[in-house]
Image (spheres, coloured by chain):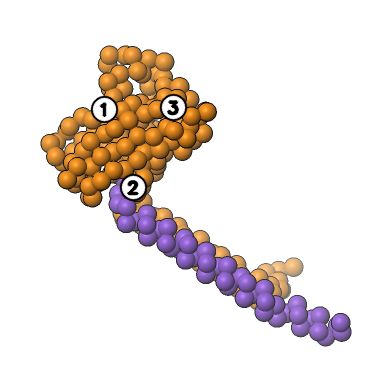
Chain colours: A orange, B purple
Amino acid sequence: MSAKQMHIDPFERNWIVFSVIMLVLFATAVAVAAFGMGIQVPSPETRVDPKTVASDPNSPWANPGVREVVAGKKYDVYILAKTWQYLPAEVKVPVGAKVTFYVTSMDVQHGFKLQDTNVNFQIVPGQVSKLTTTFTKPGSYNYICTEYCGAAHAAMYGVVIVEP
Amino acid sequence: MAKKDKDNEAFRPTGTVAVLVIFVITLILIWGTIYMILLSRGATL
């Protein structure tokens, strides 16, 4: 049967057209968010040895915490995840600061969801996950584990305190 | 049911279309709300 002879029910045809339009709209929305608004998903920043990442003196995660890059404007935060806590469990940055999180795990897979922001990624042992956000409002922002990691998974959290 | 009625029902599924329209509108509203929240939370570059 040639294409000319093919019969398509009007409802089926309309649904196909609608589906294609929706796919195009969704793809456009994702492209706008990713490339127009700068909302990126995390990619592996670098690789580390989970067995030595907390003890190697050259590893930033041997002494995790906040590093000031530009006073009041730019900060790097190194966070080490382990069952069932984040090190450090409390981070303080000033409001308006651009903060980049470098997070890795020394044991099992964890998650890192920084509430009320778009920072949300998996923490895989041996891999460093990195995302940046800007805190425009002072307050407390919890970061919580979103990957089940054992008995005390639900108690695994920390807090970013954004100071005015 | 007469054959004519069966054919009519097959070609005019008003209830199905109505449910589908409600479903799609709900889906778009939920998706749109989350999308706006995502945009309002700012960049992660």
Chain letter behind tag 2:
A
| Residue A106 place in picture, x, y as percent | 41, 21
Kindly identify the amino acid type of the residue bearing the numbered disc 2: Thr
Report helix, strand or loop for mark 3: loop
Residue linked to disc 2: A117
Residue linked to disc 1: A65
Choose top left, top right, bottom left or bottom right for residue A51: top left
Compared to residue A149, the image places residue A2 above or below, namely below
Choose top left, top right, bottom left or bottom right for residue A90: top left
Compared to residue A13, the image places residue A47 above or below, namely above
Choose top left, top right, bottom left or bottom right for residue A18: bottom right
Report the front residue among A72 and A69.
Answer: A72
Residue at 36% x, 38% y is A143
Q: In the picture, which quadrant includes the C terminus of chain A?
A: top left
The answer to whether residue A45 of the structure is visible from this angle is no
Report helix, strand or loop for mark 1: strand
| Residue A21 place in picture, x, y as percent | 51, 66
Q: Earlier in the sequence, mark 1 or mark 3?
A: 1
Residue linked to disc 3: A84
**How far is mark 1 from mark 2, CA to CA?**
20 Å
Chain letter behind tag 1:
A
Same chain for labels 1 and 2? Say yes or no: yes
